[in-house]
Structures are given as C-alpha cells and as structure tokens.
Amino acid sequence: MSYLAVKQLNKHYGATQIFENIDFSADEGEFVTLLGPSGCGKSTLLRCLAGLTPVDSGQILLQGTDLVPLSPQQRGIGMVFQSYALFPNMSVKDNVAFGLKMQKQSASEIRRRVDEALALVELNEFAHRYPHQLSGGQCQRVALARSLVTRPRLLLLDEPLSALDARIRKHLRDQIRRIQQELRLTAIFVTHDQEEALTLSDRVVLMNKGKIVQNGSAEMLYTQPVDAFAAGFIGSYNVLDAREAGALTGRTWQGQVAIRPESIVLVPAGQGIDALIVSHSLLGNVIRYRVRAQGIELLVDVLNRSVADLHPNGVRIGLQLDISTLCEVA
C-alpha cells in the first residue's frame, strides 16, 4: 500500500471545476512534483491535501488513514508557502519554534529541535534576526525549517522558489532535495517550472485543466510524452503532424510526432536535410536555433562550445534526425 494515496478527488467553486477525479500516490520517502501551467489546479490540490481547502469528494489516504474528515492540525502535515508566511514580529528562532509551542513541547525539546532545524537550513547564525532583516532566500529557508521542525508525516511545498532569483533558486532547490533525502521525507512539490520538476523529482504528475495528463518518472515524461500538451510543456518538443513528419523522415506516421530539439543535429550544407537558419537565441550553455526545412520550422538545440561554432541567421545548413528519439503523440 502506498504511503500517500489520493483517490478520485474532486473540487469545484460554484460551476467552475478546479480538478476532477484526481488519482495519484507517493511512496514513503518519495519526492513527487505536481507540474503544470498556471490555473491547472495544482496549488488548490496541495491546499486540499493540507486541509486548508475542503474537497467535494474523494479520499486522501496517508498511512492508511483518510485525512478528508480531519482538521489541518490533525493531519501531521508541514507546508511551505510561496509567500513565506512568517510572523514579522517574531525572530527566526521564534518563527521556527511556533509549531512546537502549539504542540506544548518542553522548552528544552523546543530549543534542541529548533537548533537542529536551523542547522539543516544553514541559518543558526541568523536565529535572533527578524524577517525584515533577511533576504528572500533566507526567509524561505526559515519557512522550510518551520515546517521541518514539527517532523511532519508529509511535506508540502507550494512553489517555494518562484519569487527568488535564479542563483538563489538553484541553491535552495539543491538544499531542499538534500534535506528531503537526508530525512527520508515524503514530499509533494508544486511548480510550473519544468526544470525544477525534472531536477528534483522522483516522480512527476503533469496536470492540465484540472486533470492528470501523465504520471511517471522525470525521465519517462521527458522521453515519452503521451500527448501534444505533454510534449509542448516538457522539453520544448517540436510537434509535427503526420504529413510534416513524413516529409522530413521519409516514413509513414499515423498521428502527431514529437521531436526533441537536441535530437536534431546540424551538419554542413549539402548533407542531410537542406535547411535555413531563421534565427538563434543564446540560452547559456545551449544555442537554440530556429530553422526552416521543407517549409517546416523546427527548434534545434546545440551545445554552446565556442563563438566559432555559431551559425549566423540566413545561412544554409543540413539537418540529421535521430529517428529513434521520435515519438508519436495523441
């Protein structure tokens, strides 16, 4: 039996359906990400797991107990919000200690566990500061420590990194994963950022318009998207109709075909499929080319090795497709 099992969960606001018949599970110690565009229902689903928003029907089974009838305080769940939700008039250590005081733990136990939690997030030296004296990344680490200190059975994280700059976001992302693995926490993480999902997750639950589109390992979602939405949301796939795919490959296809940008290789003009460089964008260690071949526009990702390798706009080039990486999607 799964550590967490969500079964046939439904939520409406009036006539508006937020999500419908949601089924997914998490094993003990597993990091599961709810991924999808804004408005797909993932944050509302997380709030339903926490008990902050009631559900219309369905079950949330945690270690075999249905949480739906229980209050948030009875669920044994920790939650980290996007907005930090720290008490501005409390110091870092008092913010972290708050949940333990509500549990009426002894003063010595509170001190010990607060020190442990602050050490985990590397904030011991900031224990006596107040939220307005901290950076955004430090505030988010305080919020994480506050959730960890109560030793939750389940840790929920609602887009905790979205308000941070790229460098801090990457550092905190690595810290969250390290702590989760070190403590063997079962965690549900909400994001609309595919890179976060692919980097952090043991498993990804991809949502769209209130429904689960695909549920599996990060590698499976990236290499085997089940439909055009999954292909478009994960990895910037080129999605072609059967005619376009046939024109490029010389094969017959029954439906839409997804081609990853990095599975297309640029070769000298006169080799492979004749193409024209339409434009290019620098994405750090990758150059993304937009090319046109047989009237079909494609994205091609190439490692940015040196300036000498850059192909300027308007030049002819050849393309080679790795047929084994193509997949038909619904």
Image: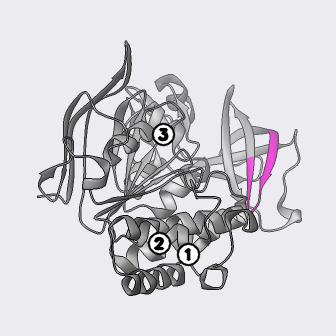
User: Measured from the top left, where is residue 140 in percent x and y?
Assistant: 60, 63
**83 relative to 218 in the view: left or right:** right
Are the residues flagged by discs 1 and 2 in contact, CB closer than 8 Å?
yes
What is the image's colouring?
one colour
| SS assignment at label 2 | helix
Amino acid bearing label 2:
Ala
Residue 173 visible in the shown view: no
Amino acid bearing label 3:
Gly
**For the point 65% across and 59% down, which residue is it?**
88
**308 relative to 38 in the view: left or right:** right
Q: CA distance from mark 3 to mark 2?
A: 34 Å
**For the point 68% across and 64% down, which residue is it?**
131
User: Measured from the top left, where is residue 13 in percent x and y?
Assistant: 39, 20
| Mark 3 or mark 1, earlier in chain | 3
Please give the count of numbered marks on the rendered protein: 3
Give the residue number, with chain letter if any, for mark 3. 36
